[in-house]
Amino acid sequence: MIEVIPLKYGVAFKKAFGKKEIFTSFVKDVIGVKIKIDEVHQEYEYKERIGKVAIKYDLFAEDKDNRIIIEVQQLKEGDFFDRFMYYHIISMAEQVSNYIDYRFTRNVYTIVVLTSVPRDKSIKFSMGIADMDVKDEEGKKQDIYKHKLIFLEPRLVNKKTPEPVKKWLELIKDSLDGTLDEEWSKIKEFKKIVEEIKVDKISPEELARIKDEAAWEKVKKSEFEKGKEEGIQEGIQKGIQEGIQKGIQKGQLKGIKLGLKLKFGKKGLKLMQEIEELQSIEKLDKVEELLEEAKTLDEFKKGIKQI
């Protein structure tokens, strides 16, 4: 086994996939497009801010026809899908230079690699594609827009995962425990990735950033678990209180029903549905007081309406 830095860490992922030959090979297998680029940018941001939120892309590259973004994400947070859709749309909007020509000069492909299984089970696929193309009334694509937002989940690789993508996801998944099978280093297209993420090839500066990243992920996970536990306890307490409330209400309703029967007979019982709809203990307290004070059924009915 080979000791490596898991590819769930942005530092390791960008170090390996930021290499031009690895980046282009990965892109070709995932989206089926050959790109010709000079370099891959890390932590890339546009010179002018587009929209209200500043964005830095983990990996960014483009040629004359295509703009490629790759993001790696360890924990799926609440705004996961919206955030990456925003990243994707901004890379399209940035191309519109003036109000006369709304032309997208490049196709935008955003690839998001999620390296943990979401706790909320909202992702149930190894590869999901948000395709923006137009479909006609017969469901046929018109090949107008080529832009795609692609989500990859290595931990959910299955029989239906496309073969060209599957090998990449299996490599990423195998690295997540900090070791890789020796066989990966024998595969030509993956040999360089293995070399880049070997533990002994990580510089002290990179290791420090990885430790910071790991600490931050631990904090976020800890806060999530804390919030989850607090939510459970709050739910239990709320459930207990609601149970007590319902028990009191049930007892009050039985008492009121008996009182009506004794005081006003069957005619009084006809008001029970109306009384049950009052629900709150405070209102039922007032009904009990009214039942005790009212001398006639009409007087009681009038009082119920006021409650």
Image: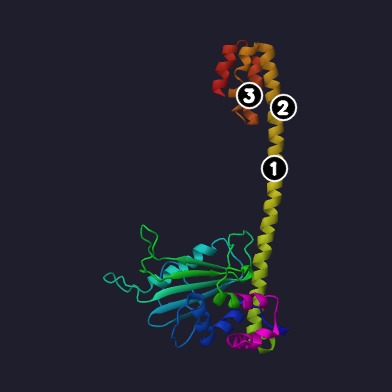
The quarter of the picture where residue 113 lies is bottom right
Q: Magenta stretch: residue 177 in it?
A: yes
Q: To which residue does mark 2 refer?
A: 251
Q: What is the x, y in percent for residue 2?
A: 71, 85
- Which image quarter is the N terminus in? bottom right
Where does label 1 land, which residue?
Answer: 239
Mark 1 to mark 2 CA distance (whole Å) = 18 Å
Element on which disc 3 rests: helix
> Which residue carries the number 3 mark?
286
Can residue 135 be seen here? The reply is yes
Quarter of the image where the C terminus is located: top right
Q: Amino acid at mark 1?
A: Gly
In front: 177, or 202?
177
Q: CA distance from mark 1 to mark 3?
A: 25 Å
Asked if residue 202 shows in the view, the reply is no
Q: Is disc 3 surrounded by few (<14), some (14 to 19) or many (20+) residues within 10 Å?
A: some
Name which of mark 1 and mark 2 comes first in the sequence: 1
